[in-house]
Image (tube, rainbow, N blue to C red):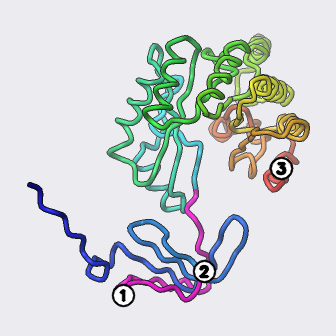
Amino acid sequence: MSTPVKKVPIHLQSSQTRLLIKNGKIVNENEIMDGDVYIEDGVIKQMGKNLIIPGGTRTIDARGRYVMPGGIDPHTHFEFEFMGTKSVDDFYHGTKAAIAGGTTMIIDFAFPKPGESPLDAYHSYRMKADSKVCCDYGLHVCLTGWSDQVRKDMELLCRDHGVNSFKLFMCYDFMVDDGEMYSAFEHCKNLGAIAQVHAENGKIISKNAEKLIAKGVTGPEGHEISRPEEVEAEAVNRACVIAKQVECPLYIVHMMGAAAVEALQSHRNRHGGDIFGETLACALARDGRQCRHECFAHAAGHILSPPLRSDADTPAMLMKFLKA
């Protein structure tokens, strides 16, 4: 016969599990107000003024300071192996840095290696991350092709592992075609998941790259030329059109150009619905002119896809859309 577990009265529990943040300016999504926040076992229990709390609670005086929710970074790449490279930060150093900057959750991408299934890639990333992470984390799962096995893996990932977002690519060697993207979007819709897309026209980029190489343009300065704004915008428009056919929520990652953002905004204005876009911090502070710098290392350090745009007005335009 088991012995009943007696719960320790709250006034005798360790004060380390209870925290009161007093006199701060509390920032929520709709207002900033003066008040206190009471936290117990890592969960906010009360918020406001004149709170009634247990004795012995640890107190922090936040007078003159903002009390803000921790940030969520939905797009990180820790221990990411891609095209013969590996990202510098592992899950320990990356999440430790996140916490230092006020980010308390990250969402990374489980990217299958050649021949690896989405489900196996998910488990592989869990094995990398679980023992190292310093904050909450989740995983998007990348789909580098389409098949019945991928369809089944998506179902298992949603049902058994809480995954609810899947990323597809419209460029690179593992891009999907329009029909495959339609099928993947439709399956995401049925599973209650959101589809993510890297939106660039891979076929056009490949042809442009061939021409540039034939002309001897092989440095960082050729990167944006091979992937002009209209090529990004065309892919954004196409992804939105396909998502609309099956009413699938769509999230377009790292949007970098004015034309691409305008294409997304046009669909939002016409159809509403769940269509979202993200940009990157570097796109709000730098532009593609850096890729023509005389120092190769400096120029190469500004290469990403889609590329930074050379129009110096682009960062301000992206900031304006973020505020909208």
Looking at the rendered structure, the kind of residue marked 1 is Gly
Q: Is residue 103 above or below residue 107?
A: below
Residue at left offset 53%, top offset 43%: 107
Residue plotted at (61% across, 33% down): 192
Q: Quadrant of residue 121?
A: top left
Q: Amino acid at mark 3?
A: Phe
- Crowding around mark 1 (Cα neighbors within 10 Å: few <14, some 14 to 19, many 20+) is few
Q: Position of residue 129 (x, y in %)?
A: 39, 41
Verify whether residue 79 appears in magenta. Answer: no
Name the residue that disc number 3 marks: 321
Label 3, secondary structure: give it: helix
Quadrant of res 96: bottom left
- The residue where tag 1 is placed is 55
Q: Nearer the viewer, mark 3 or mark 1?
A: 1
Tell me if mark 2 has few (under 14), some (14-19) or many (20+) residues whose alpha carbon lies within 10 angstroms of its own: few
Distance (Cα) linking label 3 and label 1: 48 Å
Q: Main secondary structure of the magenta part?
A: loop
Mark 2 or 1, which is nearer the eye? 1
Q: CA distance from mark 2 to mark 1?
A: 24 Å
- x and y percent of residue 122 in the render? 44, 30
**Magenta span:** 49-71
Q: Is residue 51 left or right of residue 232?
A: left
- Three-letter code, disc 2: Arg
The numbered mark, 3 or 1, whose residue comes first in the sequence reads 1
Mark 2 = which residue?
65
